Image (cartoon, helix red, strand yellow):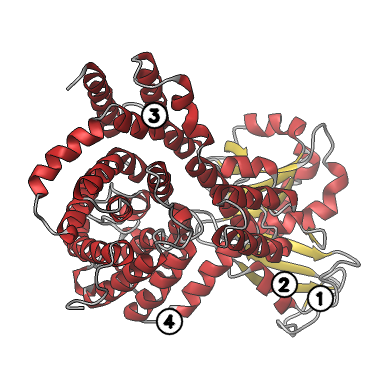
Amino acid sequence: MDLQQILFLLILAGSLYLFISERLRVDVTAMLTLLALVLAGVLDARQALSGFASEPAIIVAAVFVISGGLAATGITERIGQGIGRAAGHSESRAIAVVMPAVAALSSFTHHVMVTAMMLPILTRFAQARGMSASRLLMPMSFAASLGTTLTLVSAPAFLLADNLIERTGAEGLGIFSITPIGLALVAIGVVYMLLARWLLPRRFGALADDGYLRLDRYRTELVVVEGSRWSTRPLADLQKALGDRFRLVGWLRDGRAREDLTGSSVLISGDILLVEASADTLASLHDDPGLGLQPIARYRGQADGDGEAQLVQAVVAPGSEFIGHSIRELDFARRFHAVIAGLWRRDGDAPPRLAEARLREGDVLVLWGRPSQFGELAAHHGFLMLVPFAGEARRRVRAPVALAILALTVIAAATEWLPASLAFLLGAVAMVATRCVDVEQAYREIDVRIFVMIAGVIPLGIAMEQTGTAQLLASGLLHLVAGWPALAVLLVMFTVAALLTQILSDAATTVLLGPVAVELAQSLGLAPTPFVVCTALGAVVAFLTPIGHHGNLLILGPGQYRFADFLRIGLPLTMLIALVSAWMSRWLWLGGPLLPGG
């Protein structure tokens, strides 16, 4: 072992310690590792910075923006709601519908985003049918991770694996090269969960409060603007456009409540709709030129001051002087130069007309006004806090454009009309240029930690190859597996990656073990592709602990899961996945049989 190998191993040990202990953020650790490799003379500056211009880093950033465009136009939300409706009334049907649908969603978007989107939908679904959410959330989270194996671009590990394979001089992976394996794994996952449902815990209790995730019952009033796109259209069209998180409470026409009007009745200018809506829907309604929030439309001229008018939220404090008074009596527009545009109350018990609601402790008010007027509100002892409104407007009218951009991006990458990195970069730019997502939100959608981590760990893999450390480790592993069949060696690489990914990210695991897989394959005189792919699969779809995947961490609390639940359910599934992954990798790249005995 020479000096450079010793230096590299010392840097690697320090990096692993920081990654595992999480004393620093993963992106900071990656940057420190990169700088250490340069200062130690293991890599030059060009090699150290090559990760920032690499295809994996560019594609990951672009996929975040494209996912943001799909979310901003309401596509992912509506798909999620459709999945919830199709799930029926039984656990088995729910699992059979949810898992393939969630896997398909995860194939071109970030799986954590899909998990976060489906979490409240499945929670409400379970509560409405008297089911335990813990019976549905784990299958959903596993399916989101399994869905990342359907395409090359849905998990950083596969992009890094492709980059490594190309560096060996072998032909790189296409966007759908791993799809046959992914389809098999999703099918195995669905069948396993249906047959092993008895292993899933059935826990109730903490989930009884359906407001634990977000505030989704804001009471407000809408007015149909004269000459708008909604005028002369039936109410059902508006309800369909806004989705399940929009509920009609009452309908006023010419100042009188009309109980004879239904979903098929036509909206006319001046109609006032008394509604309950989610935060995102409320923000969408505020931005819709065809609809106006009635309190704002009525008092717009009184909201004077500097700056662009905006929505904020305020919580009514205990002992507040506002408690017991109706919104009409308080006359916020005159007193604070702000308008109460919406109200959230935990028990949802509020009169149909917003102005008639008498405030209670803990009520959340949605206020509209100008920033220069918010100082007095923020300092008032009647409120606990004054914070920006959490809802994001859905640009639903641009949903067809966002879908078309996604389709063209995938086609351009799949047909190799454009390199995958350029195709997805073009798709991300198109999402911004067509205003499916604004540029500020696009930047917010990019998880900088993941981008920087990928750019930082790619040089780690280069250093492992360049110093000969990968060859050294592969030689030791080769002595262990000498004479073993290729299938067994593939299983070994999957298993090592599956264990390491429980403490490292899938990207870091692939970067560390990928070069070892390449050296091992070359020592055996075999193509490196199946060995690298199996390593990446082990890093992505090993369900041994809740800390192995960020999606599992999201459901840990809401599902009331314990560490042992994941081991009991995930270990048999991971063993099945390992066997299928190794078997199909051998079939795809080593000419092995597809069927046993073939």
Q: Quadrant of the C terminus?
A: bottom left
Q: Residue at x 43, y 78 (%)?
A: 87
Q: Amino acid at mark 4?
A: Gly
Label 4 SS: loop
Label 3 SS: helix
Q: Amino acid at mark 3?
A: Ala
- Image quarter for residue 502? top left
Q: Amino acid at mark 2?
A: Leu
Nearest to N terminus: mark 3 or mark 1: 3
Do the numbered discs 2 and 1 sit on residues whose CB atoms are within 8 Å? yes
Q: Is residue 533 left or right of residue 453?
A: left
> Alpha-carbon distance for marks 3 and 1?
57 Å
Please say whether residue 359 is visible from this viewpoint.
no
Tag of residue 267: 1
> Alpha-carbon distance for marks 2 and 4?
25 Å
Do the numbered discs 3 and 4 sit on residues whose CB atoms are within 8 Å? no
Nearest to N terminus: mark 3 or mark 4: 3
Nearest to N terminus: mark 4 or mark 1: 4
Residue pointed to by mark 4: 88
The mark closer to the camera, 4 or 1, is: 4
> Alpha-carbon distance for marks 4 and 1?
32 Å
> Alpha-carbon distance for marks 2 and 1?
9 Å
> Alpha-carbon distance for marks 3 and 4?
46 Å
Residue density around tag 1, few if under 14, some if 14–19, many if 20 or more, within 10 Å: many
Residue pointed to by mark 2: 238
Tag of residue 560: none
Most extreme residue toward the front, as rendered? 525
- Image quarter for residue 314? top right
Q: Residue at x 29, y 72 (%)?
A: 188
Nearest to N terminus: mark 2 or mark 4: 4
Q: Which of 405/581 is in front?
A: 581
